[in-house]
Image (spheres, rainbow, N blue to C red):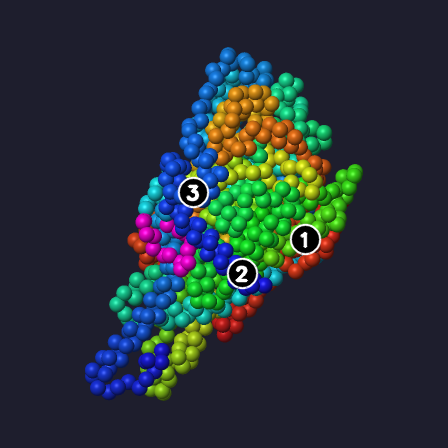
Amino acid sequence: MTNVNRIRSLPLLATAFALLLSSCGGAPSASQSPTSGPQVVTQVVVQTQVVEQPVEVVVTPTPGPNSEMAIAEVEQGAEITFWTFYLSPTFDDYIKATIARFNEAYPGVTVNWEDRQATLQEEYRNSLAAGNAPDVVNVPTGWVQEFAQKDQLVNMSEALPQAAQEQYYPALFNQTDVGGASYQVPWYQAVDAYLVNTQVISAAGYTLEQMPKTFDEQKQFCLDFYAKSNIPCGLRMATDNLLQTMAYEGGVEVMNEGGSEFTFDSPEAVQWLQDYVDLNEAGAIHKDLVLLNAAEDRVGLERFTTGQMPFYVTGPQLIRIVRESNPGLYGYLAMVPRAVGRSEALPPVSMSIVVSKNTEYPQASAALAAFFTNPQSMLEFAKIVQIFPSTPASYEDAYFTQKPVAIEDQIRPLAEGIISQQQNILPEIPEQADVNDVVRQAIEAALFGDADPQTALTDAVEQANALIK
Amino acid sequence: MRVIAKPVPSSRTGRHRAVWVSNLFWYVVLGLASLVTILPFLWTLSTALKGPSDAIFSLPPQLLPRAPTLDNFVKVWGQLPIWRFFLNSLFVATFTVTLNVLVSSLAAYPLAKMRFAGRDLIFYLLLATLIVPAELTYIPGYLLAVNVFNYYDTLWALILPNIFSAFNIFLLRQAYMSVPNDLIDAAHIDGAGELRIWWSVLMPIIRPTVATAAVFTAVTSWNALLWPSLMLRNRELYTLPVGLLALRGMFTADFRLIAAGAIMVIIPMLVAFLFAQRYFINGLTGAVKG
Amino acid sequence: MGIKQRNRLTPYLFLLPALALMAIFTLYPLVSVAYLSFTEYSILSPPQLVGLENYQRLLSDKVFWLSLRHSFTYLLVTPLIIVLAIMLAIAVNRKLRGIGLFRALYYIPVITGSVAIGIAWQFLFDGTGGPVNGWLLQLGIIAKPIIFLVEPGYILPIAMMMTTWMGVGYYMVVFLAGLQAISYDLYDAAKIDGCNDIQKHWYISVPGLRPSIVFVAVISTLSAIKVFDEIFVLSNGTGGMLNSGVTVVFYLWKQAFKLQNVGYASAVAMVLLVITLAFSIINVRLLERQED
């Protein structure tokens, strides 16, 4: 089967190589004038002309410290630790400047900022257990539930004054509902889209218009694409929250109505898993990427950067990494909306800020969380990297209404519409970490073992239900 | 091997040749084994020296970088305090070794040379602790560190649990037993106290075994991974292995930088080994034989 | 025999620091872990006694049984490492120019540390284009790259190879010392009897090394049954796809420190204790038989 495919695809491969070679000399590196050399993909290259135009960052002067003060009384002399996730060293300046502004609004509070990477989740868990957790932490929103369930986070619905809560889109503020309250404030949002390598898809005879629009189309696309080009897709499940992936992509009801039992062995769930099994067996997806966790996102991105997949689901904020490691590819990038799952909804791609319950300075910590997520902080952040604010007020700025120039920005005018509609369709999952581990094992068994999806999922549902009994 | 098995020629030049051929054979064997030994290091070094234009993975595998660069080292050095990790490792190893050897050599002396009630009981108790896997103590050890001693996230958390070592006590007891009793009796007659006898009469004699115990303890402490990774949160306190793990998490996809970090972490131990090779080899294997 | 003390307290004072530390860092944890194994405990809230529940759960926990199987499979490292280390010891046990350099070289992996080595091995076995894949492709042994560290079934053998590679230099030196204790006369006699080189080593070196072999077997089985670092580093802390690399100690770590099921992890720890106890008894028997 594979052999036949390979032989059939030889001429295509040759064409692909020819295209690759011919573009080598002429590919505009991002800073070059675009007129040199032959262009393979005109549509996208046009956009590179203006790419290097520096984005003006206008910091509007703060009209007095009180305007950004969300909490009136903070502990005097408070010293709080703030962990961010994968932001240093690129955004050092921004974070330091924002902390400086925070200090203007709240003099007398010391903020010790540290950045964490791949090990953040474990480090935060362990520090909570050890009782020396950082006061304020930036975590992917998907992690909030676990910590909130273990009663380790400050209830933001109580800690923040009403006015501060109203600065966010309500759906984002309430996106992880634990016992009817919010234990996070929404920070920057990303809009995951297809980052397309137009060089790779046109070599296989595809255009941007043919990119899949639905989960089902995506499956067919990957199978066809692999047959034509021998290049697999780089699909991956969000392994930190597999039930979420199931719910959005497969339209699976993961729990019953009352939330007392898991139901992710329904025909929809089996079909969803079967789709991945089919793709995997055909070789049409990168085996080692499909179960990559969010912290290892960049392993997949690196693979994309080296031309080993047609598209990668990611946010525009990561384009800079592609640009750094392979400047030549930049001109061939395009962003288009990603396929929508059978749930017909898109999962929020969201960062949160949480406050640890055992903090000595709950007021100052909540103030910092609210400050980093206020409209002005968010707008300034959005101006230096392609992220989207969780605060409606930020979108009133001209920055969001003007026409985009760079590839990274193709999504921007649509962002408010998408962001404001993103919301969680998942119920609260009890014992989230353990259940996720069980689900992961079932998926691994179906993808890499001999278990058929139905058996694997039924088995997992049984184990998961035992965990919540 | 077949080469040597041939009957030895009687003429002088023939014998000379046989030796030469045999030597060549052994050099080939040793060379192949060396290749297997250094290949992972060489590959890592080569990856660390590759610039963005050099492919990390290509077919055929490209061992030598076309345009070697030190940029990766500079970048890693600038982003993570490797020197800090080194100092932390050094601090932990120094204190662990000193205290461990001190406590062990104190404990081993009466076990080897004194008569007292309960000696056998204590001896067998110590022997029994050898069976307890260190991994088993990590859970309660973690709770102790957090709830009782409050040394979680300090370097002492890596030192204190590693001062007691039944293994070293037995090693040193063996050494004390080989010291003649007359020597101790003579010191008693001179009016020396036990502490003085231990320090100025016995310690100098058992010094080689102390060195053995010290090297063994030092290498174990230097390379420890699981316990330090549980105890350290603050990046400023990381030891080299924990720091290298963090570095890998930081540069997930950038193999060049990870490789550069790995090379930098290996270097201090390698230098120590080159300068004190004999101690290392005697120390580590001596410990096994004791 | 011992010497009589003037002060009856002296021996106890010498032993005091060691015994105090032993009580705190070995005996107390032992008692504590035994207690915790009967509780449900997540560190965040106080432990609750649950009787034998954890042990019952162990019996039906497939991953736990898998981890036991992996830890026992890991024991295959012992014969492998013994054979390779003896061969290497024989190779370096001769007067050749630069032989000291070779001995030192083979020793380097022993002192390097598992994280750096694990990273180097990850590069070698990388699934998209590591050199091992490259060479296998070149030689025509495989038609497309194998994603070694993801496909279940490879991570355990690779970790075992890594353990062997890391340890062989260490055991080589042990055997070298053993070889050097064997009298040269024996080899000369064998030569006269018409033994070839291989026979010579089979009939003289191997029996002569018996004490060292037993010793190495004891040491390496005990460390093989407790393997953690190699799996942890090679699998990036996941234990490998389908738990294909999970060993008992790895499972203990995962339950205790990743999922924070401390009570359950303590039950795993108790099983580990029983296993090492059994191994220690076997080892003592072996050593005793050797004394005879």
Residue under circle 2? A8
Q: Are marks 1 and 2 on the same chain?
A: yes
Residue A39, which numbered label? 3
Q: Amino acid at mark 1?
A: Gln
Element class at badge 3? loop
Is residue C101 in view? yes
Count of numbered marks: 3
- Confirm whether the magenta stretch covers residue C122: no
Q: Of the residues tagged 1 and 2, which is closer to the observer?
A: 2
Query: Do the residues bearing badges 3 and 2 touch, measured as CB atoms within 8 Å?
Result: no
Q: Relative to C43, is B156 on the left or the right? A: left
- Confirm whether the magenta stretch covers residue B67: yes
Element class at badge 2? helix
Give the quarter of the figure containing the C terminus of chain B.
Answer: bottom left
Position in image of residue B166 (x %, y %):
49, 54
Region of the chain picked out in magenta, as a range: B54-68
Q: Are marks 3 and 2 on the same chain?
A: yes
A220, A163: nearer the viewer: A220
To which chain does the residue with label 1 belong? A
B56, A207: nearer the viewer: A207
Residues at marks 1 and 3, CA–CA distance in whole angstroms:
41 Å
Magenta part mainly helix, strand or loop? loop
Residue under circle 1? A274
